[in-house]
Amino acid sequence: RNAARALASRLANIPVVIADSDLMIANLVRDVMKSVGFTNIKMARDGQEALELLKTQTVDLLITDWRMDPVDGVSLMRY
């Protein structure tokens, strides 16, 4: 139990961006991430919005859809 609390505490501090143009999928991913302890989660509706977040904030974990316009997930990963 103490190990689970310690892990949740560490996960809470990891900055995460979820980029998906499908709001239902993005919310599902966010809910799963929260259920395991992530709390520092930013959402992006498309690749362009995610790119702006990546330019201005430190992000340790990016979860992205591959097919988005105008910036796709592959381009985000290359950034």
Image: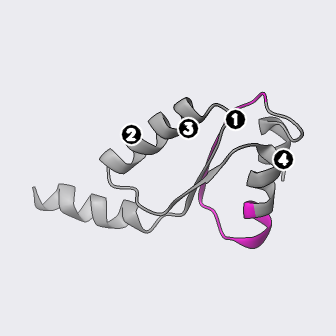
Q: CA distance from mark 3 to mark 1?
A: 8 Å
In which quarter of the view is residue 77 placed?
top right
Q: Camera-side residue: 78 or 30?
A: 30
Q: Camera-side residue: 61 or 55?
A: 55
Asked if residue 32 is positioned above or below residue 10 in the image, the reply reads above
Residue found at x 66% / y 69%: 58
Q: Amino acid at mark 4?
A: Arg
Q: Are marks 3 and 1 in contact (CB under 8 Å)?
A: no
Q: CA distance from mark 4 to mark 1?
A: 19 Å
The tag on residue 26 is 3
Q: Which residue is mark 4?
A: 78
In which quarter of the view is residue 47 placed?
top right
Q: CA distance from mark 1 to mark 2?
A: 18 Å
Q: Amino acid at mark 3?
A: Ala
Disc 1 versus disc 2: nearer the observer: 1
Crowding around mark 2 (Cα neighbors within 10 Å: few <14, some 14 to 19, many 20+) is: few
Q: CA distance from mark 3 to mark 4?
A: 21 Å
Q: Magenta stretch: residue 59 in it?
A: yes
Disc 2 versus disc 4: nearer the observer: 2
Residue segment shown in magenta: 53-67
Question: How far across and down, in percent of the image, does residue 62 sit?
Answer: 63, 49
Residue found at the far front of this picture: 23
Disc 4 versus disc 1: nearer the observer: 1
Q: Which residue is mark 2?
A: 32
Residue found at x 66% / y 37%: 20
Question: How far across and down, in percent of the image, does residue 27 sit?
Answer: 49, 39
Q: Earlier in the sequence, mark 3 or mark 2?
A: 3
